[in-house]
Amino acid sequence: MQITLPFHYDFDRVLERLSLDPLHAVSLSDKSIRVPMASGNVVVVKAAGSSRRPVFELENLEEGQLDRIKDIFHFGSSLDAVNAHFANTNLSALFSEHQGTPIVREFSLYGSLMKSIIHQQLNLSFAHTLTSRFVRTFGHENDGVWFYPAPETIARLRPEDLREMQFSTRKAEYVIGLSEAIASGKLDLDRMESKADEEVAAELVSYRGVGPWTAQSFLLFGLGRPNLFPIADIGLQNALKIQWQLQEKPKAEEIMRHLPDWSPYLSYAALYLWRSIE
DNA sequence: AACCAGGGAAGAT
DNA sequence: ATCTTCCATGGT
């Protein structure tokens, strides 16, 4: 089927960012991406218009999956309110630069959580290598795209199995421990969809390996929430150092002074700052 | 070679 | 409660 958006939408920027993750099946020449769906099929989202007149061709869409696709890609509403909000802030230039770039949700909540843990304290290059190795070893490929493994699969592993692919012992324990909690039903990620940010964060942080940064990343990219700014993130600190032309990375208190100005769209500030150094 | 990286747990005040 | 140290690994 085909859908047309009645507002500006920069799919080129979306694909550019998604293509940074080697697990994503992006075709820049084709302006398309293959999306692994929870039910096992793969939906192809392909740009058929322009950023000014966005039209998308959705292939292999199954019954009831349109809402999920619209949710993932933020096809449901424009970013006019976001842009208007930042027009009078110290990030106005940044927002002008990235106009029409939405937050695109991770395709799997479990994948989002695993990816955040694997990415902790690692440079992006190695983090992507490690995540890719994790999925290609324990997940499965279908219709040209990789699916994250089932939590049950990872719950059965021993830390040594992950150490072989250069996980640290701790990271292996975190990943397996959370997968156990999810597989047993104790931790239900789907149920997070209807909970408030603070409630989600409080529950996730109670698990070993999940701190504020990981909980915020899950809320931002996994659930697509609009008002998170992971203050501990080195990338954001470096981006702000450049943005503000500082000699050193700004300290947490310095950054926090600006958060009220950027709220309730902190996630967009974070996204565009990340984009500014990628 | 030394320092850094899309942090977090454990230990020490 | 808050501050400091240690963890493990590849990148630059």
Image (tube, coloured by chain):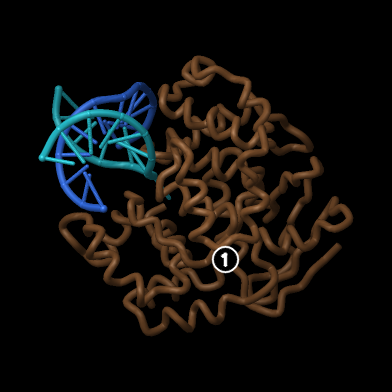
Chain colours: A brown, B cyan, C blue
Residue B7, picture quadrant:
top left
Task: Give the quadrant of residue A188.
Answer: top right
Quarter of the picture containing the N terminus of chain A is bottom right
Which is nearer the eye, A12 or A252?
Answer: A252
- Residue ID at (73%, 44%): A36
Amino acid type of the residue that numbered disc 1 sits on in the rendered structure? Pro
Q: Chain of mark 1?
A: A
Q: Is residue A54 above or below residue A233?
A: below
Q: Secondary structure at mark 1?
A: loop
Q: Does residue A159 sit above or below A192 in this rendering?
A: above
Residue A99: give x, y in percent of width and height.
51, 73
Query: How crowded is the residue under tag 1: few (<14 C-alpha within 10 Å), some, or many (20+)?
Result: many
Q: Residue at x 47, y 26 (%)?
A: A173
Question: In the image, is A210 to the left or to the right of A183?
Answer: left
> Looking at the image, which is closer to me, A190 or A70?
A190
Residue drawn at the location 87% of the way across and 52% of the way down: A62
In this picture, residue A94 sits left or right of residue B2: right
Q: Which residue is mark 1?
A: A102
Quarter holding residue A40: top right
For the residue pair A56 and A88, the one nearer the viewer reads as A88
Tell me if residue A84 comes above or below residue A161 in the rendering: below
Please state the horizontal and vertical placement of residue A97, each as a whole percent of the image: 44, 71
Give the residue at x 30% y 72%: A258
Foreground of the two, B9 or A34: B9
